[in-house]
């Protein structure tokens, strides 16, 4: 009788351990789209307020890339605020992550203006800009469409642009594409942080 | 007595672990679910189509798009580019997976010769292809050769170089892009293997994934990506 109790106790312990293991290593359901790129992401060189910055400077860190502009009325502030929230949710894991915003409006966005703008959302964020040719090449290669529908720098204008956020892994490969954080199909900062936590902790 | 029970328990435990392991191996070896690789991002662009209106990569979101590159002054047979596109468009409805799913599809022909391929010139081609296949066609280009070079050369990674004699040397290529703007297939011009049938088969694989990628089935498809179970 006592032996079968022992057996039962062992069974419970093993089942609990098995359950915990399954829960710990359960397949994660990504909110973003995961890529298995066979080639590294394009290694751009753009300008920050502290001088030139290359993507490859961040090997060893995860990099979140977002494209926008500082005169942006809605999408960019919302997204940057959401990315700042993601950093909060990540806590200490956030140290392994670098958020970079790249301007799609190089005519108006100076490196200093970009730096001031992104720091307003989070002290660790980096803002980059460059020549029109460089920006066009980077945006094109990262699947980012942008267009200036009307206006001039004097009259003020808006820029239409793709608002996805891209995650580059520490080896420089594009790993996840996150849809915009606004709109009916938008993902929440919590979903984004869950994806990142899963990747950062492995 | 107890030791026999405990060892029985371990037999069961090993059997479960073994079954899970064998299942994973079987999934990789037999590949019950096959997918197209998510190669890289298709470029972001804004070009001008055959109606003279802008066509951007954003406007094509949610559609499966087959891109190719071409110019109207290309000496015949010009690598059979338009005939191949037409063949794929015509036979698309015969792909079983495409018939079951209602997936919006577009065919985009990028002209490498903006100086001569004006919207008026491209309009005639677009009309004819639409009339022959009943599908959505865009014949696009960008008036600024430098911007076009960035889109095609850097973005799609397709080589082309205008020659002094007015021809354009280029690598014929077909590129399949999904609704998220991710390149899922790149096809070079082949005379031995039939490129067109391969493209059609891949349309089917992609359609099946799009249709089944919900709920629990989504996990199987993501596992297929993870285990690199790529369709031939």
Image: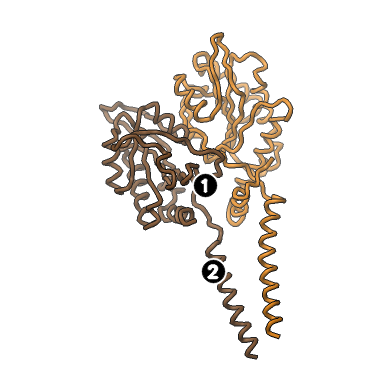
> Looking at the rendering, in which quadrant would you find the N terminus of chain B?
bottom right
Q: Quadrant of residue A13?
A: bottom right
Q: Indicate the colouring scheme.
A: by chain
Q: Between A144 and B85, which is closer to the camera in this rendering?
A: A144
> Dot 1, how many residues are within 10 Å of its Cα: few (below 14), some (14-19), or many (20+)?
some
According to the image, label 2 marks what residue? A20
| Residue B161, numbered circle | none
- Toward the right, the furthest residue is B192
Q: Nearer the viewer, mark 2 or mark 1?
A: 2
Whole-angstrom CA distance, mark 2 to mark 1, is 27 Å
Q: Residue at x 58, y 56 (%)?
A: B215
Question: Can residue A71 be spotted in the picture?
Answer: no
Image spot of residue B174 (x, y percent): 61, 29
Marks 2 & 1 on one chain: yes
Residue indicated by mark 1: A33
Residue at image point 45% right, 21% down: B146
Determine whether, in the image, residue A115 is placed left or right of residue B107: left
Q: Callout 1: helix, strand or loop?
A: strand
Please report the residue visible at 67 percent of the width from the left and 30 percent of the height from the top. Answer: B88
Lower position in the chain sequence, tag 2 or tag 1: 2
Q: Quadrant of the C terminus of chain B?
A: top right
Q: Which chain is brown?
A: A
Label 2 sits on a secondary structure element that is helix
Q: Quadrant of residue B167?
A: top right
Q: Quadrant of residue B216?
A: bottom right
**x, y (%) of residue A34?**
53, 47
Tell me residue A29's x, y (percent): 53, 55
From the viewer's side, name the closer residue of B49 and A81.
A81
- Identify the chain drawn in orange: B
Along the line of sight, the residue nearer the viewer: A182 or A44: A44
């Amino acid at each position: 009788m006592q032996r079968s109790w022992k057996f039962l106790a062992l069974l419970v312990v093993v089942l609990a351990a098995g359950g915990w293991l399954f829960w710990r290593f359960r397949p994660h359901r990504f909110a973003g789209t995961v890529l298995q790129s066979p080639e590294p992401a394009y290694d751009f060189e753009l300008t920050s307020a502290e001088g030139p910055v290359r993507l490859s400077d961040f090997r060893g860190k995860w990099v979140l890339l977002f494209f926008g502009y500082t005169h942006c009325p809605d999408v960019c502030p919302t997204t940057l605020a959401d990315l700042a929230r993601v950093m909060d949710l990540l806590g200490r894991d956030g140290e392994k992550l670098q958020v970079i915003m790249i301007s799609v409006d190089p005519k108006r966005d100076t490196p200093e203006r970009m730096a001031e703008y992104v720091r307003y959302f989070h002290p660790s964020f980096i803002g980059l800009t460059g020549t029109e040719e460089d920006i066009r090449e980077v945006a094109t290669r990262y699947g980012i469409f942008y267009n200036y529908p009307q206006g001039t720098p004097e009259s003020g204008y808006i820029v239409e642009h793709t608002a996805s956020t891209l995650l580059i892994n520490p080896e420089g490969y594009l790993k996840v594409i996150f849809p915009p954080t606004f709109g009916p199909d938008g993902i929440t900062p919590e979903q984004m942080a869950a994806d990142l936590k899963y990747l950062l902790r492995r | 007595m107890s030791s026999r029970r405990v060892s029985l328990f371990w037999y069961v435990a090993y059997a479960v672990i073994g079954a899970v392991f064998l299942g994973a191996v079987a999934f990789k070896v037999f590949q019950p679910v096959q997918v197209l690789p998510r190669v890289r991002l298709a470029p972001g662009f804004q070009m001008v189509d055959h109606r003279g209106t802008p066509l951007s990569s954003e406007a094509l979101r949610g559609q499966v798009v087959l891109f190719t590159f071409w110019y109207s002054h290309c000496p015949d047979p010009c690598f059979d580019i338009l005939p191949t596109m037409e063949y794929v468009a015509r036979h698309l409805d015969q792909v079983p997976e495409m018939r079951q799913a209602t997936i919006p599809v577009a065919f985009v022909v990028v002209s490498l010769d903006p100086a001569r391929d004006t919207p008026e010139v491209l309009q005639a081609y677009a009309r004819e292809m639409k009339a022959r296949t009943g599908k959505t066609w865009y014949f696009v280009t960008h008036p600024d050769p430098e911007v076009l070079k960035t889109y095609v050369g850097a973005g799609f990674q397709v080589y082309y170089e205008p020659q002094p004699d007015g021809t354009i040397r280029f690598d014929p290529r077909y590129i399949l892009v999904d609704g998220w703007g991710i390149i899922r297939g790149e096809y070079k011009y082949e005379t031995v293997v039939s490129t067109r049938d391969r493209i059609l088969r891949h349309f089917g694989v992609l359609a099946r994934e799009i249709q089944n990628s919900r709920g629990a089935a989504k996990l199987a498809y993501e596992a297929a990506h993870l285990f690199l179970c790529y369709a031939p």
